[in-house]
Image (cartoon, rainbow, N blue to C red):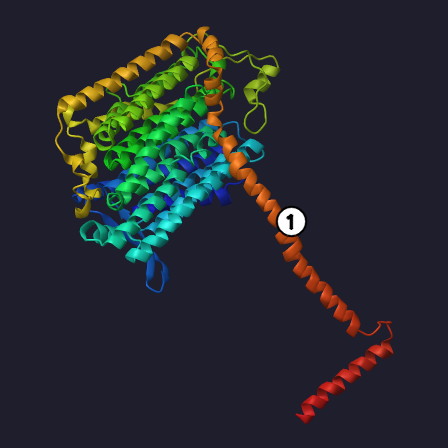
Amino acid sequence: MLWIVLLAPLVGAIVNGLFLRKASKNVSHGVGVLAMAVSFAAAVAVFMKMYSSNGEPQIYFAFDWLQAGGFSAPFKYLVDHLSGMMMLVVTGIGTLIHIYAGGYMHEEESTYRFFTYLNLFVFMMLQLVLGDNLMVMFVGWEGVGLCSYLLIGYWYTDDKNAAAGMKAFLVNRIGDIGFLLAIFLTYKHFGTVSFSELKNLIGTGTLDAVKLGAIGWITLCLFIGATGKSAQIPLYIWLPDAMAGPTPVSALIHAATMVTAGIFMMTRLNFMFYLAPSTMHVIAVVGALTAFFAATIALVQSDIKKVLAYSTVSQLGYMVLACGVGAFDAGVFHLFTHACFKALMFLGAGSVIVAMHHEQDMFKMGGLKKYMPITHAVFLVGVLAIIGMPPFAGFFSKDEVLWKAYIGAGPIIWGIGVVTAGCTSFYMVRLLCLTFYGDHRGAGHHEKHDSHGHASKAEEDHGNGHHHSPHETGPIMWAPLVVLAIMSAGVGLLGIPHVLGGHNLFAEYLKPVMLIPAQAKEHWEFLHAEYSHSIEMGLMGVSVVVMLIASSAAIALYGKGPKPILATWKKSFAGIHTTLSNKYYVDEFYGVTFVKTLREMSQFLWAFVDVKIIDGIVNGFAELCRFFGGVLSFKMSGSIHRHAMVLVVGLVCLLSILVFN
């Protein structure tokens, strides 16, 4: 069954990529969905087998792979509570997104390439989450990076899309350097890259000062890798631009799978991170700052997908913050709930974009509730989940992160988290109001183009005199949204905290994966200490009040369309608004500081080193050969007698050498 889980998406990618190049889009869609459905069904069977065996990790050997001297990294797969859960998320939500994609991509003439990339991405993500050693994980790590480049730049004839794909690829490569260094250091100091062996060596043994110091550097390098994949400061810049790709790509890569790779990797190696408190402090601070930083940018964005993009960066910051304070289970719980409601939000936004004929500016929407009642209902559930409205999923996971941040990092980090939660509530309710409530602000149907640069069919019809109002999408698009809405409303019940009378089943489920080494237990004892329920309830109440105030403010300002006072505030606080609108000018700063410098350096090296030195040496050697050839050659007159004489003389010389030797 595990082979079916792994290979079904790969087979789907091969069939679509090699054999269905001229098939109809319905056939390519059907193959892509079938591959995912088979993989998900097999994943459920594998998960149930693992869970029924008292949660004992199941290790599956595939084949010998890398062997050099004492180094060995076979292809092995590990199915335990962590990878089993991730396997279900990747294949389950991936299947829903594949179904939805058939409706979203209906304007495409051919979709075989799209579903090839999408299936291949899922295959690589499964390699990442199921690998039993760092090398197999790295194969999946690089694979999802490649597939994200292909999917983000799917409409590669558009310069913006092509540039966004390249940006994602290059920024992730920067983080991957850190991951590679971590792999090298791990093998150097511990002689293995296997998760199972590392857990036995580090989790149960006593380490000397040298190895403890090495773990500090290893975990720091691993976190650099995580900042790339999971879009944290300073490597978060690729994710907002990645919204240039098709919306199903945003939902799959940037909500449920690839961006969570960093959190998954740190949780898989939690026993190492627990031994590096300095690294953990850095992780917590970076996570908190990223969450706040991205949330403030989202406050003023007008593009519906850009709001969701910065929301994703912010929510990833919450997960990283949880990991930084040692609450890996809380981080993974938020990963799980976020996968549900953020996939719902992205796909809901995709439905709105389709209904609005590829318009993404929220200020040109409004009043869509009456045109799209189903999309509005499920979108409302997603918003309530992400802002943390009890008892939706986001309430339980976000509260757990904030509580662990308070006891693990103190009131300042907790305060940043609460303010971020208030910002989240404001910009998500703002998005909901601008999109679905008030009067419809769509200005007829100006000619708009899809990301290929071609006018949509609806717009072409309008050009022929047919008017099309926004409309509800078909069942193939709203049915997956309904499933995701049910999950967004209900999965939080798996993590009801003790203070509310629950047992936090999700934390109990992940207990076998967590291991605080004996040398670190004293430092992390606060995670399991007893605290007054009144403190936790009070902090929970504060976050709920902040959420309600921020949501009410958004409703007051945007509930029936943007209020006139907003224009006044925009002028009064023009500096702040401009700074946020331009995303703190981080891209411009990177452009001047790094991109321009590297480009100028590259041009200098090309002009001086490549052209003058390398090419000069090669050309000089060629000229030297030509000179000596000219000196030693006879004047070629074309005379047959002279050529025959040279041939005879040469043969006589050779024969003489052979005879006299």
Q: Position of residue 587 (x, y in %)?
A: 50, 31
**Residue 83 visible (yes or no):** no
**Image point 76% across, 87% down: which residue?**
652
487 left or right, relative to 451 = left
Percent coordinates x, y for residue 38 in the rendering: 34, 39
Give the residue pinned by disc 1: 607
Dividing the picture into quadrants, the one containing residue 142 is top left
Number of numbered discs on residues: 1
Q: Quadrant of residue 192?
A: bottom left
Q: Amino acid at mark 1?
A: Ala
Identify which residue, 536 or 339, lies in the foreground. 536
SS for callout 1: helix
Which of the 4 image quadrants contains residue 500?
top left
In the image, 257 versus 88, the foreground residue is: 257
Q: Mark 1, residues whose alpha carbon is within 10 Å: few (<14), some, or many (≥20)?
A: few
The residue located at (66%, 61%) in the rendering is: 618
Instruction: Report whether 200 appears left or right of 31.
Output: left
Q: Position of residue 632 (x, y in %)?
A: 78, 74
Residue 301 visible? The answer is yes
User: Where does residue 218 sit, x and y in percent of width and height?
Assistant: 33, 48
Say if 641 sits above or below 474 in the image. Answer: below
Please identify the quadrant where the C terminus is shown.
Answer: bottom right
